[in-house]
Amino acid sequence: MRINQYIAAAGITSRRKADELIEDGRVKVNGGVLTSPGYHVEEGDIVEVDGVRIEPADRKVYYLLNKPAGYVTSTADKEGRPLVTELVPDSVRVFPVGRLDLNTTGLLILTNDGDLANALMHPSKEFNKRYLVRAQGIVTIKEARQLEKGIDIGGFVTSPAEVHLIRHDRNSTVAEIVIHEGKNRQVRRMFKAIGHPVLELCRTGLGSLEIGRLAVGQCRKLSPAEISALKSAVK
Ligand code: URA
């Protein structure tokens, strides 16, 4: 098995991120730092990531978390901040699929299925991503239409989106936005581009998955039907 596949099968991270771990010199095979990303793991090899021995897990697990603000979407953090993976009550190591900013809340998938995670994160897979936003100031219908048509967020024009203005008070507007891409901090950059910085952001839907009534900080296992829907969506 190729080393990046082995690392993904052990539930450490996706295959793509495994290549980064190798590049960063964090992977050792039989005591030596691995330099070749094309290495094939042989029977009896001892593989370590960050000094910890890993072995592929045979049990695949799939969780949906309602991420709280202040949690890092990663399996490790140099600053020692809380990690989303700490909220999954399973002895199997999982990793997050995609990323939510530190202060974004809402729907996040965590799994040890590296192949599914990779497929879900591939840019060619344009899943609907639905967010509830509270933005500073009063967003006008004209500004919402600008967001829908596509807007320059700094060297990149977003593709068509859907925006529903829900309510506003004197200082802020609550809106729902559905996008089909996943550029870094995309929703925050879109609202900033129309002059209304995001105050709060929550992902409420991803493809056919919904956050529903899951409380912030809680996670649940995906149902078999939800798992097969995801698998067929990436086929
Ligand atoms: N868009 C953002 O700006 N932040 C997120 O966390 C997700 C989407």
Image (tube, rainbow, N blue to C red):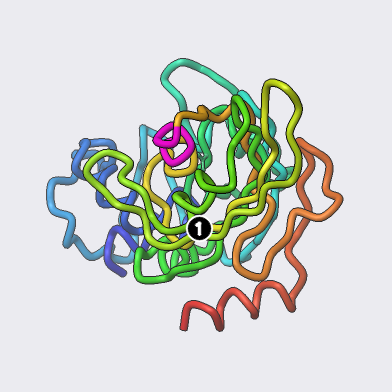
Residue 151, percent from left and from top: 36, 49
Give the side of residue 224 with respect to residue 4, left or right. Answer: right
In the image, which residues are magenta?
189-194
Q: Residue lying farthest top?
A: 79
Magenta-span inclusion, residue 40: no
Seen in the picture, residue 40 relative to 50 is either above or below; the reply is below
Query: Looking at the image, which residue is at 45% across and 15% down?
Result: 79
Q: Quadrant of residue 119?
A: bottom left
Give the side of residue 99 with respect to residue 105, left or right. Answer: left
Front in this rendered view, residue 159 or 46: 159
Residue 78, percent from left and from top: 41, 20
Query: Looking at the image, which residue is at 59% across and 54% down?
Result: 163
Residue 149, percent from left and from top: 42, 59
Front in this rendered view, residue 108 or 57: 108
Q: Quadrant of residue 121?
A: bottom left
Q: What residue is pinned by disc 1?
A: 179
Ligand 1 within 8 Å of the CB at mark 1:
yes
Question: Which quadrant does the N terminus fall into?
Answer: bottom left
Instruction: Give the residue type at disc 1.
Output: Ile
Front in this rendered view, residue 124 or 34: 124
Q: Quadrant of residue 57?
A: bottom right
Give the side of residue 99 with respect to residue 66, left or right. Answer: left
Dot 1 alpha-carbon crowd within 10 angstroms: few under 14, some 14 to 19, many 20 or more: many
Query: Looking at the image, which residue is at 66% across and 33% down?
Result: 134
User: Judging from the image, what secondary structure is the residue with disc 1 in?
Assistant: strand
Front in this rendered view, residue 229 or 86: 229
Q: Is the stretch drawn in magenta largely helix, strand or loop?
A: helix
